[in-house]
Amino acid sequence: MEDKRNIPIIEWEHLDKRRFYVLGICMTMMIRVSVYPFTLIRTRLQVQKGKSLYSGTLDAFIKILRTEGAAGLYRGFLVNTFTLISGQCYVTTYELTRKYVARYSSNNALKSLVAGGCASLVAQSITVPIDVVSQHLMMQRKGESMGRFTVRGRDGRRVLMFGQTRDIIVQIFKADGLRGFYRGYVASLLTYIPNSAVWWPFYHFYAEQLSSLTPKDCPHLLLQAISGPLAAATASTLTNPMDVIRARVQVEGKSSIVLTFKQLMAEEGPWGLTKGLSARIISATPTTIVIVVGYETLKKLSLRPELMDSRHCYDRFARCYRRFYRALPHVTRSIHQQFVAQLRDHVTVSGDGGGVSNGGVN
């Protein structure tokens, strides 16, 4: 099927790297602030036994807000912001891998598939220790903990800010050593590499289907904004069972993925594998919109100056051409046909001189 809304892809070599990283960190931080409460809720829902504390996403949101205040929705947030480093590593690996795969294939879906998997591998190697600490902080409820470790100060007083983080790090190290900070690493890889790899084919599939159903003048940006969340919801649904197991392995200190799966099935049945799914989809939706829309916008803003000037000239020409075509379609089509005919004649003449014609090799 012809891609009637094909747009040029901005590649790594076209970017002003300094501007790209600065704008990328700012954009990621803003979206992280907006979705973090649902990340916390998802983790608590996945770790709790049955529905002992919360019956669902909305119930968890109301109860946490009522008993712990707004700050309760942001437990572990400061530690979690260090994952911005892994986010930039993800982007860099993704773009460089796309560039490498482009030597062997021009298929955009294949480049995105391989690059997404490699980027997740690199990012998770940095993210897992941060996730282990931040998830234990997420488990700290008022006066108690849902996880293995409870943060308390002297004489039973609560420890504030980075004191909690230090206390959790010390407890993890005493209990498990350095390996404790990479607990659930394999489960994380089995969750996020497939999630990233599956997302891209579904994204292209939904974009293609929407493209065939919508009018030709429908903005490409709108199709991206719809296709991205649909792909995220699909990928989240397919990988959520492993995400539940990952959360339990990391928070409860389990060492076996298989045994954790068996215990979950024995205690809660197949429905246990869907825990936290709605919160995960809610948190993934704005993130995905930023990825598919904001990320391309970010790359446009980060173009090298000389390319930005040429791109603006092309954009102005394209806008003027569209207006002219709407006003005088027959005249515009005639001009286009004359241009193509003259170009074909020129190529044929040039080909006769060099042994190559428009039809092929003589």
Image (cartoon, rainbow, N blue to C red):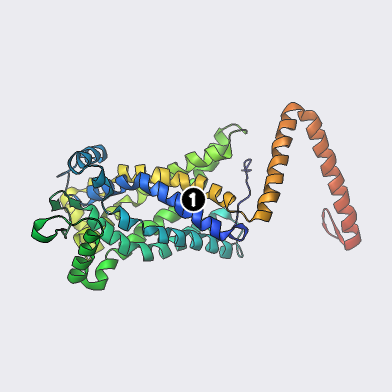
User: Farthest top residue?
Assistant: 327
Residue 270 appears in view? no
Residue position for label 1: 201
Looking at the image, which is closer to me, 280 or 271?
A: 280
Counting every numbered tag in the picture gives 1
**Seen in the image, is 63 located left or right of residue 326?**
left
Q: Amino acid at mark 1?
A: Pro
Residue at the image position 69 percent from the left and 37 percent from the top = 319
- Helix, strand or loop at label 1? It is helix
Q: Quadrant of residue 11?
A: bottom right
- In the rendered image, residue 103, in percent from the top left (x then y), is placed at 61, 65
**Seen in the image, is 232 located left or right of residue 344?**
left
Q: The N terminus appears in which quarter of the rendering? A: top right
Residue at the image position 47 percent from the left and 46 percent from the top = 290
Q: The C terminus appears in which quarter of the rendering? A: bottom right
**Seen in the image, is 156 located left or right of residue 90?**
left
Q: Quadrant of residue 217?
A: top right
Q: Quadrant of residue 325?
A: top right
Looking at the image, which is closer to me, 208 or 98?
A: 98
- In the rendered image, residue 230, in percent from the top left (x then y), is placed at 44, 42
- In the rendered image, residue 166, in percent from the top left (x then y), is placed at 23, 64
**Seen in the image, is 224 located left or right of residue 264?**
right
Residue 137 appears in view? yes
